[in-house]
Amino acid sequence: MKESIGMNYWILTLTFISVNLDFFFMLIFLLKKYRVVKVMIGYLLGNIILLTLSYFVGKALTVFFPEWILGILGFLPIHMALHDDDDDDSDKKHQSQVWSVLVTYLSVCAGCNLSIFLPVLVGETMVQFFMTLVFIGILTIIVVLIINLVSDIPAVAMAMEKYGEKLMKFCYIIIGLYVFWDSGLISHILNLL
């Protein structure tokens, strides 16, 4: 029994890292723009929402919606990249930092999280699922703290100051295009033609 529990945590760790790898880079941008606690809370909420959806609704999604439909989520990061008002100071006063991080996380990682965590979580009991939420929550906090330390390295800080906004917008566009491709949306559309 201990081996299967240990193996389960290994699988959860590998799944978390692989699903969130692209978002780790985005965290550098977010940590430069918002307070660490706000980024952490937004990221935690995003993980909880997506894990819960994967656990409770994931099976229904695969029954009722083909995977390629999740590719439509690729429009969210592209829209965020092309939206020019995100540097407006009056906007920042009215926009919650937690909400911004949450929306960014959901737009970047929803499709991958739902499709990849579904097979990992589908066999779990409710108790195991709550243990998974706690474990992923701990991983989330550790990742934010590590990335915050890396983002404080002077060379990283200088590069982010000079190129950060443009790089973030470029990453959003690439991630959106990747979501289109990875979900099968592009191949589905091409098959219809």
Image (cartoon, rainbow, N blue to C red):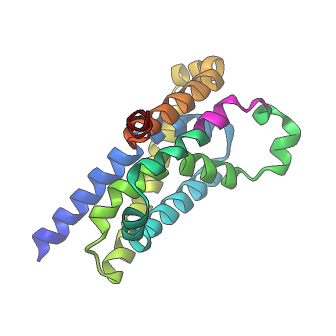
Q: Which residue lies furthest to the front in this view?
A: 193
Viewport quadrant of the N terminus: bottom left
Q: Is residue 80 one of those drawn in magenta?
A: yes
> Quadrant of the rendered structure where residue 86 is?
top right
What residue is shown at x 38% (from left), y 39% (from top)?
182
Residue 178 higher or lower than 49, as above or below: above
Q: Which residue lies furthest to the right in this view?
A: 90
In this rendering, position of residue 159 left or right of residue 128: right
Comparing 191 with 161, the one in front is 191
Residue 11 higher or lower than 18, as above or below: below
Q: Is residue 189 one of those drawn in magenta?
A: no
Q: Where is residue 5 in the image (x, y as percent from the top left)?
A: 19, 71
> Quadrant of the rendered structure where residue 172 is?
top right
Q: Position of residue 96 (x, y in %)?
A: 75, 53
Q: Position of residue 88 (x, y in %)?
A: 83, 34
Residue 188 higher or lower than 177, as above or below: below
Q: Where is residue 29 in the image (x, y as percent from the top left)?
A: 59, 34
Comparing 105 with 178, the one in front is 178
Viewport quadrant of the C terminus: top left
Comparing 83 with 4, the one in front is 83
Q: Is the magenta stretch mostly helix, strand or loop?
A: helix
What residue is shown at x 39% (from left), y 76% (from top)?
130
Residue 59 higher or lower than 95, as above or below: below
Comparing 57 with 107, the one in front is 57
What residue is shown at x 42% (from left), y 47% (from top)?
68
Highlighted range, magenta? 77-84
